[in-house]
Amino acid sequence: MAFEGLADRLQATMQKIRGKGKVTESDVKEMMREVRLALLEADVNFKVVKQFIKKVSERAVGQEVMKSLTPGQQVIKVVKEELTELMGGEQSQIAVAKKPPTVIMMSGLQGAGKTTFTGKLANLLRKKYNRNPLLVAADIYRPAAIKQLETLGKQLSLPVFSLGDQVSPVEIARQAIEKAKEEHHDYVLIDTAGRLHIDDQLMDELKEIKEVAKPDEIFLVVDAMTGQDAVNVAQSFNEQLEISGVVLTKLDGDTRGGAALSIRAVTNKPIKFIGTGEKMDALEPFHPERMASRILGMGDMLTLIEKAQASVDEDKAKELEKKFRTASFTLDDFLEQLSQVKNMGPLDELLKMMPGANKIKGMNNLQVDEKQIGHVEAIIRSMTTKEKLEPEIINASRRRRIAKGSGTTVQEVNRLLKQFEEMKKMMKQMTGMQGKGKKKGFKFPFM
């Protein structure tokens, strides 16, 4: 996750003060020095850092902390609230026009990820909000930009409007909106051209598109890995185009995260979405409070729950719960669960959203071996229907056959069967079927 270095530094600093029954002014000063360093190292704009430290310090040595029962925790609460505020306070919703279609125009430098984001946003609008978007290829300069958008459209089964690269982007935008009205598309997503650097010609063209398209939103798409440059780009685009929100792409790599904390403060425009990976569903609406929680190691259960709800079939979940209660959970059910968990995203990212995960030794360097999940699936798929329903019939010769069929070893087959049995026992205990027996920790076969 982005912010990893910042998160580590801040969490270590918070830990020192967390349990304090009395917090002195020098404690706060010491802590603020650490926080200042952590933010500057994370590439947060120095003016933003100065303002943030001032606000937190004032509140941290004020009455609300000094007179509280748990001053240490109160200071952490202040840091979290100010961090949330710094990133925009509340989540900023995407616009909806009173009269469809809602027009969204993308802007940004070349290579920021505008075209990919256009595809991801279309996918999110359809899946999460049940919308019918039209993608518009208005980047006529970059070789293969139109082709890239058309490929994404085909991949997502969504329509792409294009007039080739010989018609002006202004005319393409005008005709696309007409087409969207005729065909009842409720969103029009215009992918515009970027440049290697900001120039007047680019800005004039974008202003003309803005005049013709009258967009409800102008998103500035920024590569989070560019750090401080991202802030300068945001400032410049905002001054000339008056953007309505920022999208941060590539926030999943080794970004230090400073851009996310600075852009909002410098432009006073909200961060609307963050790109968290390369897949078409790796896009999240930006929640300042949840991000502040993640940075401070408090987990992000709400995003985790949303991911689960999007990936888990409700009827199947009820059926599964009944199987837990009656201990009729089979290896087929286990296989089904694995595929649903995989749909939620990379497992190491999911685990880090759990509250307190930062306190687990080695969690930051955790690498979940996704290949192991493949092995587990292959083993179960190499079993007969009867074996999946009654694993107890799997004797030595059957184990050898399953190992051979799945390209794994007999030891791996043994381990899976043993863990499956432990899991069933644990489920019985959790549903109260075995009184108050002690629960044994269950370790997933891919951890």
Image: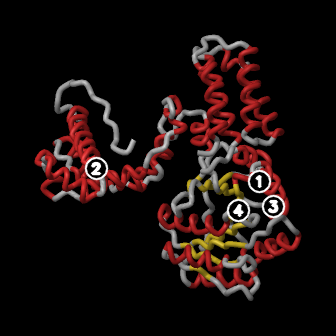
Side (left or right) of 246 relative to 18: right
Give SS at disc 3: helix
Who comes first in sequence, dot 2 or dot 4?
A: 4
Quadrant position of the N terminus in the picture = top right
| Residue 109 visible within the image | yes
The answer for how far apart the CA atoms under marks 2 and 3 are is 58 Å
Who comes first in sequence, dot 4 or dot 3?
A: 4
Residue for point 53% across, 61% down: 279
Q: Which is in the foreground here, disc 2 or disc 4?
A: 2
The answer for how far apart the CA atoms under marks 4 and 3 are is 14 Å
Q: Quadrant of residue 62?
A: top right
Can you identify the residue that label 4 sits on? 112
Can you identify the residue that label 2 sits on? 409
Q: For this rendering, which residue is in front, 147 or 52? A: 147
Q: Which is in the foreground here, disc 4 or disc 3?
A: 4
Can you identify the residue that label 3 sits on? 237
Residue closest to the far right: 200
The kind of residue tagged 1 is Ala
Q: Which mark is residue 230?
A: 1
Horizontal and vertical percent position of residue 292: 62, 38
Horizontal and vertical percent position of residue 404: 24, 57
Side (left or right) of 438 relative to 83: left
